[in-house]
Structure formats: C-alpha cells, structure tokens
Amino acid sequence: MDSAAVDRFEAGRSRLASLAYRLLGSAADAEDAVQDTFLRWQAADRERIEVPEAWLTKVATNLCLDRLRSAQARHERMAGAWLPEPLLEGDPMLGPADTYEQRESVTLAVLTLLERLSPTERAVYVLREAFSYSHAEIAAILDITEAASQQHAHRARTRVAAERRRGGAADPASARRVVEEFLAAATSGRTDRLVALLTDDVTAVSDGAGLARRLLRYTSRERVASFVRAGFRPTPAKRRLAGAPLAMHLARVNGTLAVVAVAGERVVGAVAFEVSGGRVASLYGIAARDRLARLDEAWQHRAPGAPVIAAW
C-alpha cells in the first residue's frame, strides 16, 4: 500500500475509533474493528472508491454490527454482566465532544442504555446523535431505506429518553462538591447524609468488584446507600485484594466525575457519578481488570494530583 493511502486512513483513524467505541462499548473491541477496517482498506480497489471517508465509515460500522450480532457477543451481553469500558478524560475515543448530544452519547449511562437497543437501532442512534449523519447517509451506510433510518432513530431516541434524565449536565465545580461530600459520607458511615445526597430515583450499577457473574443493580435510596456504604468501607480483606495501599482520586471518566481507586500506581476500580440538582442521580462501579486496562494505561501518563483520600 502506498504512503498516501496509509496517510488517508490514519487521518480518519481517531474518528473511526470513536465511532466503534460508541457502537461496541469496548475500547479493545473498537481497536480491533478499526484494524480490521484498515485491512479491508488495504485490500480494496481504492481507485474505485469515490469518497474514502464514507467507504471507511460504512466498513467500520458494519464490522461493529457483525460483532454485536455474533453469538458470543449476544451471550455476554444478555447474561447481564456487561458494563462499558470506562475511558479517562482526554482519550481520543471520547471525541467528538463539541455538542451536548456528542458528549451525552459517550457517558456510561447512555452507553449502558444503548445495550438495550437492537444493533441497527444502536448504529442509527450513534451515527445520527454523535456524528450528525443525515438519514440519507445512514441509509447508505447500513443498506436500509431513509424511512427505516428515521424509524430506527425515533425508536432509539424514545427508548433512551424514557430512562434518561434530561436535566442537563451539572457544572464541574458543583458536581465535585457533591461527590466529595458523598465520598466523605460513604467512608465515615453517615448513612443518613448519604441517603440525603441521592435523588429519589437514583440507580447504581456495579460489576461487584469484578467478581460477580452478573451486574448488581440497586434502585432505591436506602438500598443504594447501603450498597455504597458497604463498598466504600475499608476492611483488611479489601486491602489484601487491592495488593497495595489504596488512594482515591477524582477524575473525569466518560465526561462525568468519577472516583478512581489506585493501589500503588495501578488503577483497581472506578465509580462514575452523574449529578442532577445537587444530588447523585446514578453511579456506575467498575473493577473488572480487563475493563480498566485502557484507563490504567492512560493514568500512568498523567499527573493525578493529590488524592481526596490518601490512605483508604
């Protein structure tokens, strides 16, 4: 392959990776899909490709759909043990992030909701909301009609909106104050204050420190508070599991504030928060090692600053 063809592909690699990540919820799978797209580009008769960007988008999208439809992927996702892979702020896979819709589409809350859509609905939603493709363009990418694209988009938006709070993102300073107070209440045993910091319809989802076979879900203020209190309570067993002294840092993960647990220099867990109206509306806890690999790698290349809890 000539260098010009390689350069053309590389110019769009980040966009393809961002698209694949939103479709698959996994950075590792997204990278594989992009590499497979490159191999298709390498083997293609490029002289016959009129619009390379459109061709590459079509190939990458359909490779992702093939993965979503595969028997193995359906089994993993339907087993109820699937959470999206969290990404640290600054990760190129989180782009584009110019509009509210683009930023919203990559939050852990929305990526989790997208798991409930059909593969085609998910693709239409991502292409439309995050990348602003027209229905005519989406129809060409997915080999469907424009009317079908519009119907899929309507169904996807309706399903997401039915379970999504639309209060708008809290400003970073306010969200940080709420999360800091929440963390203080969780680690000190102030359960009454913890309950007061939760919205009436709060939800919490966790992979059970990476040990549970199915996701753990909690939906009442009291149950969420009890779960959080137990999760943040330091014990000798948890310290042994961490394998090193544990510190808690605040960072932005998938566009929202998160508590990142670091043992030594290794990330061992992350809890992402959504704040609405001065209270916590949802939490997503991830500790499965394979789900934290990319976040951990990014963490090694940043100066995290002082932890909010230096010795847990």
Image (spheres, rainbow, N blue to C red):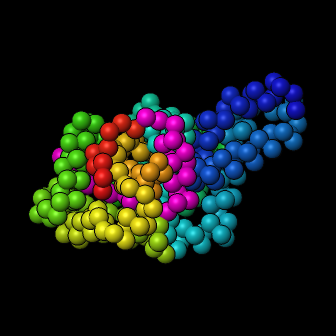
Part of the protein shown in magenta? 276-303
Residue 19 visible, this angle? yes
Residue 103 in percent (x, y) is at 42, 39
Residue 158 occupies quadrant: bottom left
Q: Is residue 285 magenta?
A: yes
Residue 60 in percent (x, y) is at 69, 45
User: Viewed as shown, does residue 257 lie left or right of 215?
Assistant: left
| Residue appearing at x 49%, y 75% in the figure | 213
Residue 271 in percent (x, y) is at 36, 55
| Residue appearing at x 55%, y 45% in the figure | 297
Residue 111 visible, this angle? no
Tell me how many marks there are. 0
User: Viewed as shown, does residue 216 lie left or right of 111?
Assistant: left
Q: Nearer the viewer, residue 189 or 310?
A: 310
Q: Is residue 40 magenta?
A: no
Residue 3 occupies quadrant: top right
Residue 147 in percent (x, y) is at 57, 49
Q: Is residue 224 above or below residue 110?
A: below
| Residue appearing at x 84%, y 39% in the figure | 42
Residue furthest top in the image: 4
Q: Nearer the viewer, residue 147 or 263?
A: 263
Residue 307 occupies quadrant: top left
Q: Is residue 195 above or below residue 182?
A: below
| Residue appearing at x 30%, y 68% in the figure | 235
Q: Nearer the viewer, residue 125 or 5?
A: 5
**Quick one: quadrant of the N terminus?**
top right
Q: Nearer the viewer, residue 113 or 304?
A: 304
User: Viewed as shown, does residue 141 lie left or right of 18?
Assistant: right
**Quick one: quadrant of the C terminus?**
bottom left
